[in-house]
Image (cartoon, helix red, strand yellow):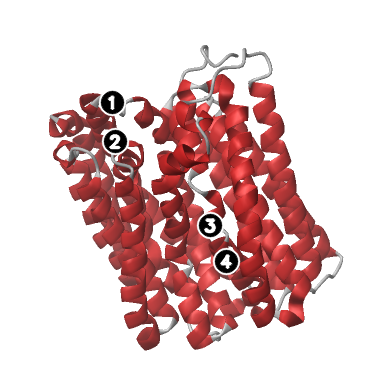
């Protein structure tokens, strides 16, 4: 099917991306279960820390270019492979510069595991390289292919981990090699699928910013580059602070709790990714963009209380079954299930803010998107440096939630035409974020009793009032 025959559809693309992300995260969770059972907590925590360090160090390599591809690509679909190639040429130069700084510093701190340092660096670069072709697939109207490439990567990783564990492997290195192979295959799959999409299309000219030299391209991508460098740090800064104060075992415990949260965060991320091309097409139509955002906010509202309850119930059952008992019996200083519930409001806030943040990202003032990410870093540092030294790993979990809520309110303020907000959805969403996790901490039965009327109210009110609130 050609580009002209396959129009953009945010609900369809969100469904594809959400389904694939959930599948990929479930596979990833299975892989992490295998790792926690194969490796001692300190070795597992160190490997997680190395991966996070390089993903943070290489965020500059993204340069914001994949986001520009997703935003502008729908209008230049036949030129998408050339846009990806142009992005890669810029990213290779940035990767070389970043590697000359990051790798020696990591080797200085972790010289006894030099091979793991190199592999963690490689995995981070391979993941960043996939962003451009996957954004191009989404811009082409083929979010399903982007979804498949993610699932293929996780299948290789999880299958390899399971095989190594069955063979009795208890060292980190073989698992690191499997992760590297999975990242490489994910990149290859996305490239092959993109070439298939444009195989029969007449080559089109590049957008002006992509054909006028490096400087215009950097200026166009600059707000998203800043965001790409800042936004992912908000859930890693807690680990870095915690590692300096509590050690690798505390990092491992927090990471297990965060795995469950990350499994849920793929849903708002997928929604925002699917909305971006559609919002981008309406960037010059304020009324159309306002209505699209309000409509999206309306159908997000019922998902929040239901997701909060489902997440708490699922993690409460699965963590003791899936992970070694040390992660849930308090022998590492805390219970990963309790930490997850402390972080759960962060998921609700991310869901609530997804349409507004997508509008900021696609709107006429993209530097607001960068400001939003910078605001998140400031909040994380301010809250984390106060709570983590006092409360340890629990302080890190609370930092995650408080940062997410603050960033949701920031997205509401920064979005184009905030007066067009679906206020019913925001009121119900914030109420759910406050009520459901708090109720779960005291009684699962009371949480169920409070969630059901919230879901019903969201279904009845948010959808009916979305259009009127937008006006």
Badge 4 or badge 1: first in the primary sequence: 4
- The residues tagged by marks 3 and 2 sit, at their Cα atoms, a distance apart of 24 Å
- The residues tagged by marks 3 and 4 sit, at their Cα atoms, a distance apart of 11 Å
Question: Counting other residues with Cα less than 10 Å from the Cα at mark 4, is it few (<14), some (14-19), or many (20 or more)?
Answer: many
Percent across and percent down for residue 264 are 46, 53
Badge 4 or badge 2: first in the primary sequence: 4
Q: Quadrant of residue 104?
A: bottom right
Are the residues at dot 3 and dot 2 in contact (C-beta closer than 8 Å)? Answer: no
Disc number for residue 52: 4
Question: Counting other residues with Cα less than 10 Å from the Cα at mark 3, is it few (<14), some (14-19), or many (20 or more)?
Answer: many
Disc number for residue 59: 3
Depth order, front residue of 43/345: 43
Badge 3 or badge 2: first in the primary sequence: 3
- The residues tagged by marks 1 and 3 sit, at their Cα atoms, a distance apart of 30 Å
Q: Nearer the viewer, mark 4 or mark 1?
A: 1
Badge 3 or badge 4: first in the primary sequence: 4
Q: Name which residue lies at 53% across and 29% down.
A: 211
Residue 460 placement, left or right of 220: left
Q: Nearer the viewer, mark 4 or mark 2?
A: 2
Residue designated by label 2:
364
Residue 286 placement, left or right of 21: left
Are the residues at dot 1 and dot 2 in contact (C-beta closer than 8 Å)? Answer: yes
Question: Counting other residues with Cα less than 10 Å from the Cα at mark 2, is it few (<14), some (14-19), or many (20 or more)?
Answer: some
Q: Can residue 348 be seen here? A: no
- The residues tagged by marks 1 and 2 sit, at their Cα atoms, a distance apart of 8 Å
Q: How many marks?
A: 4
Disc number for residue 284: 1
Is 307 above or below relative to 236? above
């Amino acid at each position: 099917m050609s580009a002209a025959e396959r129009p953009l559809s945010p609900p369809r693309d969100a469904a594809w991306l959400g389904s694939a992300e959930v599948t990929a995260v479930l596979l990833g969770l299975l892989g992490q279960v295998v790792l926690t059972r194969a490796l001692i907590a300190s070795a597992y925590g160190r490997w997680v820390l190395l991966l996070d360090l390089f993903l943070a160090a290489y965020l500059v390599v993204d340069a914001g270019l994949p986001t520009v591809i997703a935003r502008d690509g729908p209008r230049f679909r036949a030129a998408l492979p050339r846009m990806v190639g142009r992005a890669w040429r810029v990213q290779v130069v940035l990767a070389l510069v970043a590697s000359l700084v990051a790798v020696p510093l990591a080797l200085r701190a972790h010289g006894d595991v030099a091979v793991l340092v190199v592999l963690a660096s490689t995995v981070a670069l391979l993941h960043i390289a996939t962003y451009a072709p996957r954004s191009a697939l989404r811009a082409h109207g083929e979010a399903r292919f982007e979804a498949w490439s993610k699932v293929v990567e996780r299948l290789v990783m999880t299958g390899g981990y399971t095989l190594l564990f069955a063979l009795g492997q208890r060292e980190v290195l073989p698992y690191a090699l499997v992760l590297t192979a999975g990242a490489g295959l994910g990149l290859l799959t996305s490239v092959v699928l993109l070439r298939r999409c444009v195989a029969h299309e007449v080559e089109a000219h590049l957008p002006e910013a992509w054909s006028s030299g490096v400087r215009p391209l950097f200026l166009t991508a600059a707000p998203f580059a800043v965001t790409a460098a800042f936004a992912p740090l908000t859930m890693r800064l807690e680990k870095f602070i915690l590692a300096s104060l509590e050690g690798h075992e505390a990092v491992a415990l927090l990471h297990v709790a965060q795995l469950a949260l990350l499994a849920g965060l793929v849903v708002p991320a997928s929604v925002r990714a699917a909305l971006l091309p559609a919002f981008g097409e309406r960037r010059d139509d304020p009324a159309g963009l306002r209505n699209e955002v309000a409509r999206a906010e309306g159908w997000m509202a019922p998902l929040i209380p239901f997701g909060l309850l489902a997440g708490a119930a699922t993690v409460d059952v699965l963590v003791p079954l899936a992970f070694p008992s040390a992660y849930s019996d308090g022998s590492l200083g805390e219970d990963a299930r309790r930490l997850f519930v402390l972080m759960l409001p962060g998921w609700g806030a991310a869901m609530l803010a997804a349409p507004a943040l997508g509008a900021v990202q696609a709107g006429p003032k993209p530097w607001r998107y960068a400001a939003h990410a910078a605001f998140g870093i400031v909040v994380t540092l301010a809250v984390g440096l106060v709570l983590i030294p006092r409360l340890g790993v629990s302080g890190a979990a609370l930092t995650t939630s408080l940062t997410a809520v603050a960033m949701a309110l920031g997205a509401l303020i920064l979005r184009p035409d905030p007066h067009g907000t679906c206020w019913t959805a925001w009121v119900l969403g914030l109420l759910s974020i406050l009520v459901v996790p708090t109720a779960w901490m005291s009684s699962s039965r009371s949480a169920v009793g409070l969630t059901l009327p919230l879901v019903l109210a969201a279904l009845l009110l948010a959808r009916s009032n979305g259009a009127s609130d937008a006006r």
